Amino acid sequence: MTIKTLTLAVLGASLLAPVALFASELHPVVDFQAGYLLGSSTVPNKWMRPEALVKSKQLPGKRKYRVYSMKGYLGEVSGNKAISQGAPCEDTRYVDFAPSRENAKYKSGVIAIGGSWNALPRPLRQEGTYLVTYRNIVADFLKTKGIPKTTIRIAQVFRVDLDGDGTDEVLINATNHNGSNGLNGNISPDSRAGEYSMTLLRKIVNGKVQTILVEGDFYPTAKKFNAPNVYKIAGAFDVNGDGKMEIVTKGRYYEGDWTTVYAVNGNKSSSVLKVQDVLGDGCGA
């Protein structure tokens, strides 16, 4: 190898090194309100759950996070090292922030991301929950789960272009639990016949509109002390910097709660669409 060739090789390696470093850098994702460390993302499309971070000794230390609400970027905060707070959820890691979630500026904060990109590249637009179109979608889906007749309660509807292809997807949360839509109030340890809670995604797949279940629980018959789950949509954010937005949901039952990040893989020309649970954590007795 000539000196010129060697010099070019070294120069090429030095130019590529920052790209490789950025690609493998971990970007922690935290539920800003609860403080749950949901895991970390890398650029692009790799995920590490909290348990993997613990096992590999890569838990995030003190660092900066960008905080987002459903409507946009709120500001930058400092996060402490992710730690366990002991029983009853020894395996859950928490991050405390300054300014804290009690600060007026950050009260609407949903998620904190350890990355420099814009995590809300496209807006979420809230839709009416009483539109007949959405009620029919929910009713038809419930029939596939053995609930042909029940009260239709739609709690949330959002339109958002998740993958940046210029076509909006629709996110629908429908919940019928204990006589309410589940957004507020206590959760019963029992379920009544015809109760349910679910998040649906309406998306064009292979040229046709499809209804895809993101998450959900369905109770055609009454059950005692089965600890039913209630879900809601927390937002949609680009948590790993690839330009596509992941769906963020919150779930709870009568003794605990959790947050989940779902990645949607596939676009309107795809023959197969996959919704994958990629990050999440919570705490319950």
Image (cartoon, rainbow, N blue to C red):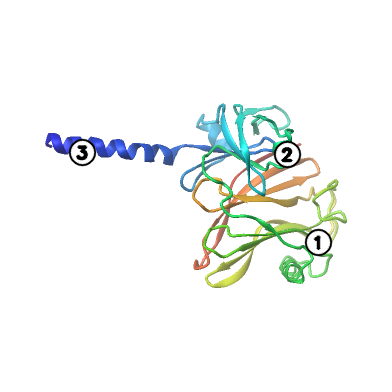
| Residue found at the very far bottom of the displayed protein | 208
The residue lying toward the viewer, choosing from 46 and 220, is: 46
Q: CA distance from mark 2 to mark 1?
A: 27 Å
SS of the residue under disc 3: helix
Q: How many marks?
A: 3
Q: CA distance from mark 2 to mark 3?
A: 52 Å
Q: Position of residue 112 (x, y in %)?
A: 61, 39
Location of residue 10 with respect to 141 vertically, above or below? above
Of label 2 and label 1, which has the lower sequence position? 2
SS of the residue under disc 1: loop
The residue lying toward the viewer, choosing from 15 and 221, is: 15
Is residue 170 found left or right of 146 in the rendered image?
Answer: left
Residue tagged 1: 153
Number of other residues with Cα within 10 Å of mark 3, as a class: few under 14, some 14 to 19, many 20 or more: few
Disc number for residue 8: 3
Q: Kindly identify the amino acid type of the residue bearing the numbered disc 1.
A: Arg
Q: Position of residue 7 (x, y in %)?
A: 19, 35
Residue tagged 2: 107
